Image (tube, rainbow, N blue to C red):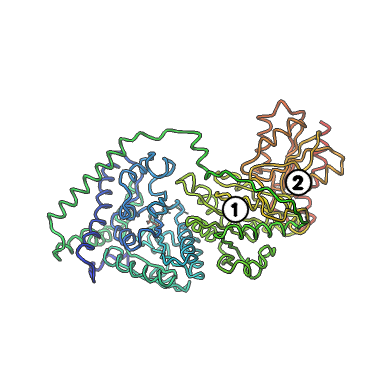
Amino acid sequence: MTENATQPPLAYRRGSLTDDELLQLYRRLLLPRMIEDKMLILLRQGKISKWFSGIGQEAISVGAASALAPDELLFTMHRNLGVFTTREVPLHRLFAQWQGKMSGFTKGRDRSFHFGAMEYNIVGMISHLGPQLSLAAGVALAHKLNKEGKVALAFTGEGGTSEGEFHEALNTAAVWQLPVIFLIENNGYGLSTPAKEQYRCEDLADRAKGYGMRSLVLDGNNILETYTQLRQLAEELREQPEPVLVECKTFRMRGHEEASGTKYVPDELMAAWAKRDPLQNYEQYLLSEGVLSEKQITDIRKGFKADINQGLETAFAESTVEADLTAELSDVYAAHEPQAVPAGEARQDLRFVDAVSQGLEQAMERHDKLVLMGQDIADYGGVFKITQGFVEKFGAERVRNTPLCESAIIGIGLGLSLKGYNAMVEMQFADFVSCGFNQIVNNLAKLHYRWGQNADVVVRMPTGAGVGAGPFHSQSNEAWFVHTPGLKVVYPSTPEDAKGLLLASFEDPNPVIFFEHKALYRKLTGPVPEGYYTTPIGQARLASEGEEVSVITYGMGVHWALEACEELGIEADIVDLRTLLPIDYEAVARSVRKTNRVLVLHEDCQTGGIGGDLSAYVSEHLFEHLDAPVLRVASLDTPVPFSTVLEEQFLPKGRLRGQLQRLLAY
Ligand SMILES: Cc1ncc(C[n+]2csc(CCOP(=O)(O)OP(=O)(O)O)c2C)c(N)n1
């Protein structure tokens, strides 16, 4: 329909809408248009930066924002100015946001519409487009769990529907029957790619069938159609939760962004859609119905013009942001003063796996808004049986089997967090986190820095090699996350720490990537306090104390080091980092000052592993305390091999003794 140069005229049906309601919709359509007209002038004058125009698509933003209740969340994209204006976001704040100023929504840290404002129940996009859809599904899950009769709505362009996240989010929302409207604004083009080069179905709405979902196709240029249909739909979903896919047909009247032009759009197509302008047609309709007069139009325009100029004046008058190093660094994380809960006297011997399970169980008892999600974690108990018996104890709503869709589930976890829940997502194996990578490093990690919202999600990661499981069930991928500001990365090496650090992770409002070495699950048993306690995140411990050498390590490395030092009779300080982001450099320094010799050991491959950073830190800050160069022992720079013979060669354990001796002989 979008690429057809003969377009049907708009057909307005007012139904039971009052004159006041019709006029309100008119005002709501007009304001974003007038703002954009002004922005185009400012852009030409070089006074504002990049601009993604929603001209011609306003009836979708305005219809949707008017259809939902003010406390229902809208997940916006880059052309949804009409949502912000309909939700009455103060214009001077919007303008300040676009100018990167302090009174915007991101303290100058993100641009255009890439922000959320929970006070207006709007969550804006990250540039990757599709991830929004899962967040909306997560909020819808919170609505469903709360039985509060509310709905969430997420926008996507037709371009974004080709992303995997679209499929994952829709499928999961359908399986879980979540009250969410997925709204496609089909404006005919991706950046420059026409719809026919993006998909082959007639209507994108047809895809709903494949998910067992209802769908609607709407004339996206007709404000009365978008508003009344979406309002009706929202009412239905509040009563009877289910996801619905809505495709609004429209057209992008300007370039992808203002500088890029529209040369690739045939003139006749542009002309056909120009005739369907949502504002002009509606204005004509209201004039012809006698609901609106020329005088009113003039007055409304005059009022808006003054508001816009006033807002612009305020925003332009504001000085540019000042670079404040302390604020920049501290805003990466949500503030958290951990209240360490000390362990009681009673202890029992537990296997590593049972300590994790007990920690998770006690976290579920303590936090009644904690929801667990993962593949096969419900009745089956997870592939490592960590959640065995949890469904019986906590119910299927809080212990949720998921389809195979790591990205959507992490996004849903974030959506839950937006509504005051906390979420745990179990990766069946840490290797599979690559399928959810984007949500972790771009959404969870950057959210607080960008617009001050925390992401209360713990991702559990059964990791590591030594189990003959080959390249895709053995990887150490902690360095991917240590490199990402905004995350906390935790990696316990003992059953006691596994439980205490896991409980601390659920107290922390920030996203935590929690590594558990699966080769320790059933091989390592140790004393674990029986009751609830937390082990502070960010504090290393000494696994053994000695004067001869500092072995700085974590996870399985702690056990290799203990074994090797005992065998060789070396008195070593074995520093178990426990947390890899942030690293306890103080503890490292204390040990290095004492022993003057340092070996950094980890199971991860050498290149780009955190050993490089640790070694650099020691050289940079503790050089005068060193009697020998800092040595690193790590896995080979190859994928993890399957054959145990090859795996043994791959892992650093076999090279550890030699390197220790070399270091001591120096
Ligand atoms: C994952 C990803 N790939 C590529 C881009 C670059 N990009 C930005 S917008 C866009 C086209 C989006 O088209 P659509 O979803 O239809 O939205 P529209 O801009 O037409 O409103 C592309 C390719 C991106 N932002 N994210």
Task: Mark 1 or mark 2: name the one nearer the start of the chain.
Answer: 1
Ligand 1 sits in quadrant: bottom left
**Residue that label 1 marks:** 506
Q: Compare residues 288 and 452 and report the one nearer the observer.
A: 452
Residue 521 makes an appearance in the image: yes
Image spot of residue 518 (x, y percent) = 72, 57
- Location of residue 589 by image quarter: top right
- Residue 376 visible, this orientation: no
Residue 331 place in picture, x, y as percent: 50, 41
Question: Label 1 sits on what residue type?
Answer: Phe
Determine whether, in the image, residue 48 is placed left or right of residue 366: left
At 66% from the left edge and 52% from the top edge, which residue is drawn?
515
Residue 376 versus residue 352 in the image, above or below: below
Q: Residue at x 28, y 61 (%)?
A: 269
Q: Is residue 363 left or right of residue 245?
A: right
Measure the alpha-carbon separation of dots 1 and 2.
25 Å
**Label number found at residue 156:** none
**Spot occupied by residue 170 in the image (x, y as percentages of width and height):** 47, 66
Mark 1 residue CB less than 8 A from any atom of ligand 1: no
**What is the residue that sits farthest to the front in this orientation?**
345
Name which residue type carries label 2: Val
Q: Residue at x 66, y 29 (%)?
A: 621
Label 1 crowd bin: few (<14), some (14–19), many (20+), radius 10 Å = many
Q: CB of residue at label 2: within 8 Å of ligand 1?
A: no
User: Which-is-in-front pick, marks 1 and 2?
Assistant: 1
For disc 2, the marked residue is 558
Residue 157 locus on image (x, y percent): 39, 59
125 vs 188, left or right, is: right
Q: Quadrant of the N terminus?
A: bottom left
Q: Secondary structure at mark 1?
A: helix
